[in-house]
Image (spheres, rainbow, N blue to C red):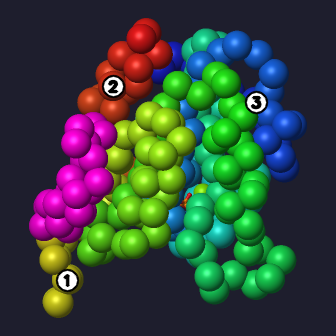
């Protein structure tokens, strides 16, 4: 499951502009600012392969990164970003749905969920949409390094609550992994999980 090499392959404005080859790929999705680009950097152990920002709405294109010349990890724009200026707001529904429904080489979706906040309806909606369309997903909880805020709950409490909600929809809930791009928590587990999915 080791990453020896990573290269930026392509930024695509639409699903039909994505690289055309047979290599398997994983899509990284989730709300704006959940830590998608940071997770990719943590996985490949490079600081700025994927561009990150404190402001939501940083990633606006479909970005393919080629790992070990054999598989892709794909950074996608976040959803649920309502406060963006008109130009930076995007229609996740048509743009990203087009990608998910037409990308034959997609072996799995990593749905990132911020463990430092309570469950968000939009994440549950996204999981349900993927489930209805038979797209295999793994929940990747991010920011597990964050400690409890004054009135907030701990990441493990938020995760438990999220899983309780998910178990209402799934007989057989998707796999899940706790991560932190700051401490590296979950990195090896996630890489191993992805290598297993590639070999199915
Ligand atoms: P968009 O591209 O806007 O959709 O955002 P994104 O999901 O790619 O988020 P990004 O990786 O740019 O990170 C957003 C912010 O969260 C940055 O300030 C990161 O430093 C911070 N962040 C990301 N992952 C973690 C984490 O594991 N722990 C902590 N404490 N902060 C994180
Ligand atoms: Mg991003």
**In the rendering, which numbered label is found on residue 14?**
none
**Label 1 – label 2 distance at C-alpha:** 30 Å
Residue 119: where, in percent of width, then height? 30, 70
Q: Kindly tell me whether mark 2's CB lies below 8 Å from ligand 1.
A: no
Q: Earlier in the sequence, mark 1 or mark 2?
A: 1
Q: Which residue is mark 2?
A: 193
Residue at the image position 37 percent from the left and 72 percent from the top? 120
Residue 8: where, in percent of width, then height? 71, 33
Residue 48: where, in percent of width, then height? 60, 47
Residue interval drawn in magenta = 155-179
**In the rendering, which numbered label is found on residue 9?**
3
Say if 41 sits above or below 115 in the image: above
Q: Earlier in the sequence, mark 3 or mark 2?
A: 3
Say if 167 sits above or below 8 in the image: below
Q: Earlier in the sequence, mark 3 or mark 1?
A: 3
Between 93 and 7, the residue placed more toward the observer is 93
Q: Which quarter of the figure has residue 166? A: bottom left
Q: Which quarter of the figure has residue 116? A: bottom left
Between 48 and 187, the residue placed more toward the observer is 187
Say whether residue 172 is magenta: yes
Q: Which residue is mark 1?
A: 152
**Label 3 – label 1 distance at C-alpha:** 40 Å
């Amino acid at each position: 499951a080791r990453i020896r090499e990573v290269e930026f392959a392509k930024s695509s404005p639409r699903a039909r502009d994505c690289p055309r080859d047979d290599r398997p790929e994983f899509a990284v999705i989730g709300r704006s600012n959940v830590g998608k680009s940071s997770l990719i950097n943590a996985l490949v152990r490079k600081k700025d392969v994927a561009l990150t920002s404190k402001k939501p709405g940083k990633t606006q294109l479909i970005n393919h990164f080629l790992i070990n010349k054999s598989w892709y990890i794909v950074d996608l724009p976040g959803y649920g970003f309502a406060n963006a200026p008109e130009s930076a707001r995007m229609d996740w529904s048509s743009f990203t749905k087009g990608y998910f429904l037409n990308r034959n080489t997609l072996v799995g979706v990593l749905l990132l969920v911020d463990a430092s906040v309570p469950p968000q309806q939009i994440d549950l909606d996204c999981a349900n949409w993927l489930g209805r369309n038979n797209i295999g997903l793994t929940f990747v909880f991010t920011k597990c390094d964050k400690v409890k805020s004054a009135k907030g709950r701990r990441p493990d409490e938020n995760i438990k609550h999220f899983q309780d909600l998910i178990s209402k929809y799934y007989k057989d809930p998707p796999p899940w992994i706790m991560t932190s791009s700051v401490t590296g928590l979950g990195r090896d587990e996630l890489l191993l999980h992805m290598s297993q999915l590639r070999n199915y």
